[in-house]
C-alpha cells in the first residue's frame, strides 16, 4: 500500500466521524424531548415572581396562566416551569396543579383567558424534580408580586426549574398552530410562611398572562384578570415538550449505524493491508 493510499484511508475514519457527528448535531433534539413552546425566564433584577399559590388563607389563593402556540406536533409529555419562593423560603412538601385549556380570545373589555379544560395533573412531592437554576446576578433580587392588590410583598434571589413529566396514558395531543393556555398553582397550605411565585419571562407572546382566585386547590377561577405589572404586559416562564417524531429517531439510528459501518470497513482495510 502506498503512503498516499494509507494516508487517505486513515483520514477516512475521522472525516466520516465528523460528517456523521455534524448530521447528528443538526438533529440532536431528536434524541431527547422536542420543544413545542419555550418562554425563558427573566433572570435579571427586572424580573418578577407572580404569586401562584394555594394556602389556607383566601388572600393567597392565586392561579396564574399564560397562552402559548403549539409549534410542534406530538403529545405534551413534559412541562417545565421556572419560579422562586418568597424570601427564598422553600416549602418542602409542595404539590403542584397544572392544566391545559383552550383559548378564549379577548372580547371587548374582557381579556383573553383559559377556556375549556383539555387536561390537568396533580403532582405530589417526589413526582416532579426541582433544580436550582440561577441566582439573580450581581447580588440583586427580584420582586415577589401579588397581582390582586398590585403590591410587591417581598423579594427573592434564587430561581428554580420544576420539571413535570406527564404520567403515561395521560398525555394530550394538540393541533399544530393552535393557541392554548397553561395554568399553574402550588399547594403550600401545609407551610405557614412559604409562597411560590411563577417567574416572568423575557419573551412576550400574543396576549398577557392571566390570574384569578379559586375556592379549592387546582380549581379554575370564576374570573380571569389580565396580568399587567407597573403598566407593563407580562408573560410567564415555561417550556412544553414532546417526544421526537418516529422518522427522526429512525434517521438518527441510521446515521449512527452508517458511521459504525464505515469505521469498521476502514478498520478491516487497514488490518488487511
Image (cartoon, grey):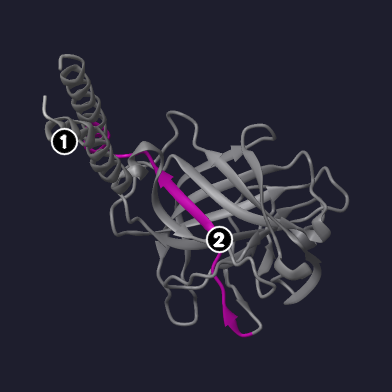
Q: Quadrant of residue 64?
A: bottom right
The relative height of residue 250 versus residue 238 in the rendered view (above or below) is: above
The relative height of residue 273 versus residue 249 in the rendered view (above or below) is: above
Question: At 77% across and 60% down in the image, what residue appears?
Answer: 60
Answer left or right for 4 relative to 70: left
The relative height of residue 253 versus residue 78 in the rendered view (above or below) is: above
Question: At 23% across and 30% down in the image, what residue appears?
Answer: 259
Is there CB contact under 8 Å for labels 2 and 1?
no
Q: Relative to the observer, which residue lies in front, 252 or 99? A: 252
**Which contiguous range is marked in magenta?**
231-250
Percent of width and height locating residue 94: 73, 42
Residue 25 at least partly seen: yes
Disc 1 crowd rating (10 Å Cα; few below 14, some 14-19, many 20+) is few
Whether the magenta-drawn stretch holds residue 233 is answered as yes
In what element is the residue under mark 2?
loop
Q: Which mark is residue 237?
A: 2
Q: Quadrant of the N terminus?
A: top left
Looking at the image, the residue that sits furthest to the top is 272
Answer with mark 2 or mark 1, whichever residue precedes in sequence: 1
| Residue assigned mark 1 | 8
Q: Which mark is residue 51?
A: none
In what element is the residue under mark 1?
helix
Answer left or right for 269 relative to 142: left
Disc 2 crowd rating (10 Å Cα; few below 14, some 14-19, many 20+) is many
Amino acid at each position: 500500500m502506498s503512503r498516499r493510499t494509507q494516508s487517505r484511508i486513515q483520514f477516512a475514519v475521522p472525516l466520516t466521524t465528523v460528517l456523521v457527528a455534524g448530521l447528528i448535531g443538526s438533529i440532536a433534539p431528536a434524541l431527547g424531548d422536542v420543544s413545542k413552546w419555550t418562554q425563558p425566564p427573566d433572570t435579571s433584577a427586572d424580573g418578577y415572581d407572580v404569586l401562584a399559590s394555594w394556602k389556607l388563607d383566601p388572600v393567597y389563593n392565586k392561579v396564574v396562566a399564560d397562552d402559548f402556540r403549539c409549534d410542534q406536533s406530538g403529545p405534551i409529555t413534559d412541562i417545565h416551569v421556572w419560579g422562586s419562593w418568597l424570601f427564598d423560603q422553600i416549602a418542602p412538601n409542595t404539590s403542584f396543579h397544572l392544566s391545559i385549556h383552550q383559548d378564549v380570545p379577548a372580547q371587548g373589555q374582557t381579556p383573553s383567558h383559559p377556556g375549556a379544560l383539555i387536561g390537568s395533573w396533580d403532582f405530589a412531592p417526589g413526582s416532579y424534580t426541582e433544580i436550582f437554576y440561577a441566582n439573580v446576578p450581581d447580588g440583586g433580587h427580584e420582586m415577589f408580586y401579588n397581582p390582586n392588590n398590585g403590591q410587591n410583598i417581598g423579594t427573592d434571589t434564587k430561581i428554580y426549574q420544576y420539571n413535570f413529566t406527564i404520567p403515561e396514558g395521560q398525555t394530550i395531543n394538540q393541533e399544530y398552530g393552535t393557541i392554548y393556555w397553561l395554568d399553574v398553582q402550588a399547594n403550600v397550605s401545609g407551610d405557614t410562611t412559604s409562597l411560590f411565585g411563577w417567574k416572568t419571562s423575557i419573551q412576550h407572546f400574543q396576549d398577557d398572562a392571566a390570574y384569578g382566585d379559586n375556592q379549592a386547590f387546582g380549581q379554575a377561577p370564576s374570573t380571569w384578570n389580565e396580568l399587567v405589572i407597573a403598566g407593563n404586559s407580562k408573560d410567564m416562564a415555561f417550556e412544553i415538550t414532546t417526544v421526537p417524531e418516529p422518522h427522526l429517531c429512525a434517521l438518527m439510528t441510521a446515521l449512527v449505524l452508517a458511521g459504525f459501518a464505515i469505521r469498521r470497513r476502514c478498520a478491516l482495510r487497514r488490518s488487511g493491508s
